[in-house]
Structure formats: C-alpha cells, structure tokens
C-alpha cells in the first residue's frame, strides 16, 4: 500500500481534516475519517 505522500492524487492536497466518532452500540464502535482537498483558488 502506498503512503499518501507518494500517491500522485494527494501531491497537491494542502487542506486536511480528520474526524472521529464513537458509537457504543454499533459493530465497530470507533469510526475515523480522513479528507483532503487542493488549495482554494
């Protein structure tokens, strides 16, 4: 698996966000999300 920094899709991505949610009654309980975007023009 390639690291994000080595993947050409992410090369110009300069804005990032990370989210986390905990749902105690769900199967996995812990949910993480990573989102990236290019700079605003």
Image (cartoon, rainbow, N blue to C red):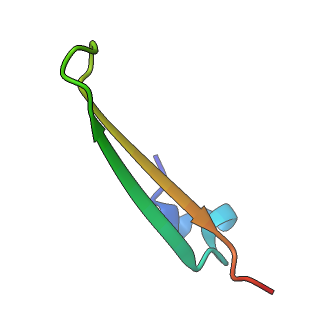
Return the x and y of residue 36 as percentages of the image width and height: 57, 64
| Residue occupying the far right of the picture | 41
Position of 37 compared to 15: left or right? right
Position of 3 compared to 29: left or right? right
Q: Answer above or below: position of 21 versus 17.
A: above
Q: Answer above or below: position of 12 versus 30.
A: below
Return the x and y of residue 19 as percentages of the image width and height: 38, 52
Observer-nearest residue: 34 or 8? 34
Observer-nearest residue: 9 or 29? 29
| Residue occupying the far left of the picture | 24
What quarter of the picture does the C terminus occupy?
A: bottom right
Please count the marks in the image.
0
Please tell me in which quadrant of the rendered image residue 37 appears.
bottom right
Return the x and y of residue 1 as percentages of the image width and height: 46, 46
Observer-nearest residue: 7 or 35? 35
- The residue sitting at 68% across, 62% down in the picture is 9
- The residue sitting at 67% across, 66% down in the picture is 8
- The residue sitting at 26% across, 20% down in the picture is 28
Q: Answer above or below: position of 27 versus 22.
A: above
Please tell me in which quadrant of the rendered image residue 15 appears.
bottom right
Position of 19 compared to 28: left or right? right
């Amino acid at each position: 698996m390639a690291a994000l920094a080595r993947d050409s899709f992410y090369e110009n991505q300069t804005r990032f966000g990370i989210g986390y949610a905990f749902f105690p009654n769900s199967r996995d309980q812990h949910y993480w999300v990573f989102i990236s975007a290019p700079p605003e023009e």
